Image (spheres, helix red, strand yellow):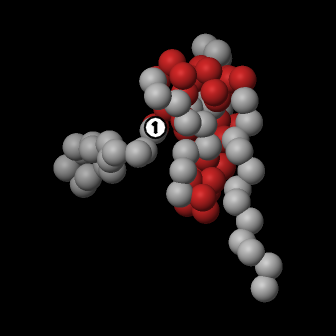
């Protein structure tokens, strides 16, 4: 969470590393596509309640971003 005074607090369960675009992790500069990727990650988190690229460590999250796809969102029961 970014507060008005510029202080930032990372809440438990929130992994900001999961929102870093693959091209940025690969050392290329960020551009508009990086923002689209991050926005997609935010939407995934809002809709599912979990990070799109989980991992126990920063390195594991980075590897997940670079090498895997997010799990499909659970579907609501019919009816």
> What x and y, as percent, mark residue 77?
74, 75
Q: Residues within 10 Å of mark 1 (few under 14, many from 20)?
A: some
The residue closer to the viewer here, 27 or 16, is: 16
Instruction: Residue lying at the far top in this picture: please name it.
Output: 27
Quarter-wise, where is residue 24 in the image? top right
Give the secondary structure at mark 1.
helix
Query: Hey, which residue is sitting farthest left in the picture?
Result: 5
Q: Residue at the location (70% across, 56% down)?
A: 73
In the rendered image, the vertical position of residue 34 relative to residue 66, given as above or below: below
Residue at (66% x, 49% y) in the render: 40
Figure disc tally: 1
Relative to 41, is 74 on the left or the right? right
For the residue pair 20 and 69, the one nearer the viewer reads as 69
Of residues 73 and 21, the one nearer the viewer is: 73
User: Which residue, given by chain and number where applicable, does mark 1 sit on?
Assistant: 16
Q: Residue at x 61, y 43 (%)?
A: 52
Query: Can residue 35 be seen at all in this image of the molecule?
Result: no
Please state, as top left, top right, bottom left or bottom right, where the C terminus lies in the image.
Answer: bottom right
**Whole-percent x, y for residue 51 in the image:** 55, 45
Q: Residue at x 64, y 29 (%)?
A: 65
From this view, report whether residue 9 is shown above or below residue 74: above
Residue 7 horizontal side relative to residue 76, left or right: left
| Image quadrant assignment for residue 27 | top right
**Place of residue 16 in the rendered image (x, y in percent of width and height, measured from the top left):** 46, 37
Q: Specify whether residue 58 is in view.
A: yes
Q: Where does the image place residue 67, in percent across and percent down from the top left?
A: 72, 23
Looking at the image, the residue that sits furthest to the bottom is 79
């Amino acid at each position: 969470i970014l507060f008005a005074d510029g202080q930032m607090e990372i809440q438990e369960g929130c992994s900001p590393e999961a929102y870093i675009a693959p091209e940025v992790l690969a050392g290329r500069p960020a551009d508009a596509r990086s923002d689209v990727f991050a926005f997609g990650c935010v939407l995934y988190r809002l809709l599912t309640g979990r990070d799109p690229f989980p991992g126990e460590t920063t390195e594991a999250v980075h590897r997940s971003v670079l090498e895997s796809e997010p799990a499909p969102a659970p579907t609501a029961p019919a009816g």
